Amino acid sequence: MIQVDHVTLRYPNGKGIQEVSFQVREGQVMGYLGPNGAGKTTTIRCLLGFSRADSGSCSIGGMDCWRKAPEIQRLLGYLPGEIAFLDGMTGRQFLGFLSRTRGGRDGVRRRELEERFEIDLSGKIKRYSKGMKQKVGIIAAFMHDPQVIILDEPTSGLDPLMQNRFTDLVLSEKKRGKTILMSSHMFEEVEKTCDRVVIIREGRVVLEDSIHALGQNQRKSFYLRLAQPEQAARLAELGCEVASLPPDRFKIQIQQERLGDLLGLLAQLDVISFESKSQSLEEIFLHLYGGEGPHESDAV
Amino acid sequence: MNLTLFKADLKGNALLLAIIAYAMMLYFSVIAYMFDPGDTTAITSMLELLPEGLMSAFGFDSVSSNLTGFLADYYYGFIVFIIPLIYCIVTANKLVAKLVDNGSFSYLLMAPVSRRSVIVTKGLFLLFSIALLFALLHVAGGAVCRALFGDMLNRRVFLRLNLNAALLTMLVGMICFFYSCLFNESRLSLACSSGVTVGSLLLFMLGGASPKAGFLKDLSLYSLLDTQRILEGGGTAGLEGVLAALILLLFLLSVLVFDRKNLPI
């Protein structure tokens, strides 16, 4: 449904994307991962026909993204990464305006979405908080029931409750057979919803795989405080990678399939606190490349 | 052309349009009120108090004894440009570059309409709003003159003055629009459009200030409004045609540039 074929686009400052290729099949949810500045938004600009690739091509539903942009918009919903609305409108006026330009009437679905995200659209958009703007953007992307949905960092600014609502929305759209491409710089964000993941770094695709395969290889990290720090040795015996953060804190990493063993061991130790640490892309890279990770400069 | 968008732009710019129209009217009424059909000595003596160079920079060279000539000298000589110029710079930037700069232009392209149709709508809105300003000025200004002086205004000349001033303002608007389409950043668009247009206005003033610098006036865009010829009632040697051609050319260029560029939104 979405096809990106050897797309190269260089900006004057040297940034951009090179030879990016991937495809999202109909009904698939694809995560598009990469650190900030890796080229995610650039790729999306090409898909929306805002920018023209220097070489290569991309298409949605078989239509060229640059030449057929208006036709593509009939089946596309889009959430920009940096969200900005037209001045001087209330949320409701804005969504109404968008509906009218699309020539459709999507009042029912719009109200459903408003309820789902518990948003009051009567005030001027300019005064909305970041999270509220994000909700308006999400509603705008979904309200006309598009076949293909492109979301650029969709959950930024949303509180955890709303992030869950959003995840539910994506899952229910997926059930209805929608094709979704979703960019993010956090693995966790795409983990719950995506079937496959493309990872991009410094403008190049470095990995494409099913989320299942990625998850299996993943290690989990935890922070731990022990009443008797010397017990940390037993964690190492179990096969954990242990880093000491004096006086009594430890950071441990373990293969996912050994989590049960870890929990068994922890039950015997004098644990003061135990918290899971979300894994950054950086760590996934580190793991994928067997310790030969990306440069520090693109740490996330 | 996209009617929904046109209406939204009209709504978004209605307040500014109203303020500009009000200011233009106010200025016009003040100037018209200053005209005294019986006696021009009062205003002549007032002008004598001020430095001569300054006065000619503003185009106040002679005091005409008929109402139409008076307005042509004092209102259409210079003041008529200033307020619409502000409108052109601000609105042209607001219509395109500002939206590209903050990214909200993406929402205009989220409909099944082409980029070209969006930008043509924007340009037409700018031209339409300028035409509206001068239409209002023509109607309301005519009414003010009738109320103050009865039938003294030469309607035909007045119409041509307004028509030519409107065309010239449209040209200024299209220059600003072109920069707004060309640049992705609001500040660049503003800098170039105000640089060119305000610069042109300054040239016009300098050229008027002394006969030696008269050639500067000819370099200015604003010399394309030839009030003397219009007053004489003769043809303006196809000046309207030149203005219309330039407007069209800039409009086409703007659309072409915008249609092809990469948008950082």
Image: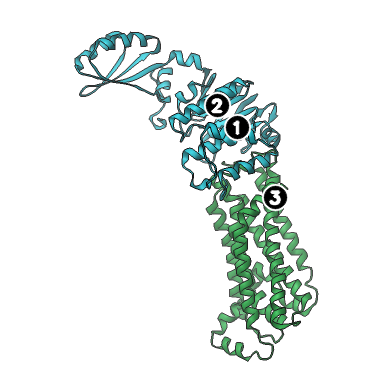
Chain colours: A cyan, B green
Q: Which residue is mark 1?
A: A142
- Circle 1/circle 3 CB separation < 8 Å: no
- Residue drawn at x 70%, y 79% as measured from the top left: B147
Residue B130: x, y in percent? Answer: 68, 62
Residue B90: x, y in percent? Answer: 58, 58
A81 up-or-down from B193: above or below: above
Which chain does tag 2 point to? A
Under mark 1, the amino acid is: Phe
The quarter holding residue B175 reads bottom right
Would residue A194 be found to the left or right of residue A295 on screen? right
A232 or A146, which is in the foreground? A146
Give the spatial CA distance, label 2 vs label 1: 9 Å
Crowd class of label 2 (few under 14; some 14 to 19; many from 20; radius 10 Å) = some
Q: Quadrant of the C terminus of chain B?
A: top right
Q: Which residue is mark 3?
A: B121
Under mark 3, the amino acid is: Thr
Residue A135: x, y in percent? Answer: 52, 36
Would residue B134 be found to the left or right of residue A272 on screen? right
Crowd class of label 3 (few under 14; some 14 to 19; many from 20; radius 10 Å) = some
Under mark 2, the amino acid is: Leu
Of marks 2 and 1, which one's residue comes earlier in the chain? 1
Which chain does tag 1 point to? A
Q: Which residue is mark 2?
A: A169
Which chain does tag 3 point to? B
Crowd class of label 1 (few under 14; some 14 to 19; many from 20; radius 10 Å) = many
Q: Are marks 2 and 1 on the same chain?
A: yes
Q: Secondary structure at mark 3?
A: helix
- Circle 2/circle 1 CB separation < 8 Å: yes
Give the spatial CA distance, label 3 vs label 2: 36 Å
Name the front one of labels 1 and 3.
1
